[in-house]
Structures are given as C-alpha cells and as structure tokens.
C-alpha cells in the first residue's frame, strides 16, 4: 500500500478514536461534577466551552469578556452569551472596580471554584497520561512528532 494512503487511513482511525475518547472523557468529567457539586440541578449541564471560560476566570485576575475571548479564541459575542449562562447557573459573579464603573469583570463563585478545580484536576490527569504515552519515544521522534503537529495545526 502507498505510504501516504497508509498514513491517511491511520489518521482517519486516529481521529475517530479521539472523538470517541473525547466523548467518554467529557461524560466522565460531567459525571464527576454532577456527583461533587451540591445542588447540581441548579447548575445543569455544562459545555466544554463553559468549563474553559470558568478555567480562564479562575486562572487570572480582572477577567472581562475581551480577555476571555482572546485567550480561548472565541468571539466576544459568544463569550458574552456564555458568561450570562454561567451567571444564571451561579458559577460566576460580576464586579466592577470603584474607579472604573464602565468595565465589568468576572470571578468564580464558591461553586464555580469547585467545578473549576474538578476540571483542572481532570486536565492534569490527561497531561500525566499523555507524558506517560510519550515516554516511549526518543527525543528525535518527539521532535519530529512536534513538527508534524505544529505544521498540521498552523493556520
């Protein structure tokens, strides 16, 4: 079989498996949040993007719609809609600085912090698993893999 065709077939298989794994991991994460958060029914289902907004807010000071949009790579309009949902779910709260009543910032509520901590520990476990997987490769192989991924993801 042609090497390019072989790579293409492996690539498609890889994408399908990653999609399946991603769905399973998302279900696991949401189940953990549901189990851990008191009054989960008030929070309701969370999207991955909502979790990433919480992560941005939890990881920075003075976070507004613009900074969230820049770091996540989503439009300001989308972030505005998401923050409204997160405010209603009781995961975020808004505040303004005394000397700047124009700009609105966000911070996590206690429940938002709990959800964010679960999400963060989930990402740490994924990272550890990936490092274990990559341990089987030589530095030269890792450099090549990094190059392939970088070039495949360049826009």
Image (cartoon, rainbow, N blue to C red):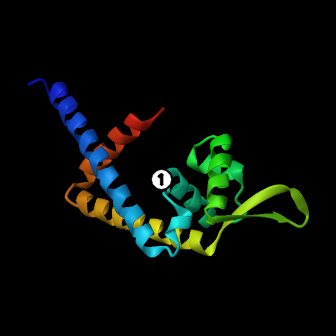
Regarding mark 1 in the picture, which secondary structure is present there? helix
Residue 87 lies left or right of residue 51; in this view the side is right
Q: Position of residue 9 (x, y in %)?
A: 18, 31
Q: Nearer the viewer, residue 83 or 100?
A: 83
Crowd tier of the residue under label 1, counting other residues whose Cα lies within 10 Å: few below 14, some 14–19, many 20 or above? few
**Residue where numbered disc 1 is placed:** 48
Q: Report how many numbered discs are placed on residues in the image.
A: 1
Q: Quadrant of residue 57?
A: bottom right
Compared with residue 146, is residue 97 higher up or lower down, i.e. above or below?
below
Most extreme residue toward the front is 41
As rendered, which of 106 and 56 lies closer to the eye? 106
Q: Residue at x 24, y 34 (%)?
A: 12
Question: Can residue 59 be seen?
Answer: no
* Left or right of residue 32, residue 136 in this image: left
x, y percentage for residue 63?
70, 59
Whether residue 91 can be seen here = yes
Query: In the image as oriented, which residue stretches furthest toward the left?
Result: 1
Residue at the image position 48 percent from the left and 32 percent from the top: 155
Q: Quadrant of residue 29?
A: bottom left
Direction from residue 141 to residue 82 in the image, left or right: right
Q: Residue at x 70, y 48 (%)?
A: 66
Quadrant the N terminus occupies = top left
């Amino acid at each position: 079989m042609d090497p390019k065709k072989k790579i293409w077939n492996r690539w498609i298989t890889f994408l399908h498996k990653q999609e399946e794994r991603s769905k399973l991991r998302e279900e696991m994460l949401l189940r953990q949040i549901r189990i851990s958060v008191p009054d989960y029914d008030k929070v309701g289902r969370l999207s991955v993007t909502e979790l990433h907004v919480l992560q941005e807010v939890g990881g920075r000071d003075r976070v507004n719609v613009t900074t969230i949009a820049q770091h996540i790579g989503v439009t300001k309009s989308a972030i505005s809609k998401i923050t409204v949902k997160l405010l209603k779910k009781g995961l975020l709260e808004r505040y303004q600085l005394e000397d700047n009543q124009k700009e609105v910032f966000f911070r996590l509520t206690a429940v938002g912090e709990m959800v964010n901590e679960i999400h963060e520990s989930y990402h740490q476990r994924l990272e550890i698993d990936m490092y274990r997987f990559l341990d089987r490769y030589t530095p030269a192989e890792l450099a090549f893999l990094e190059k392939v991924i970088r070039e495949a993801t360049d826009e």
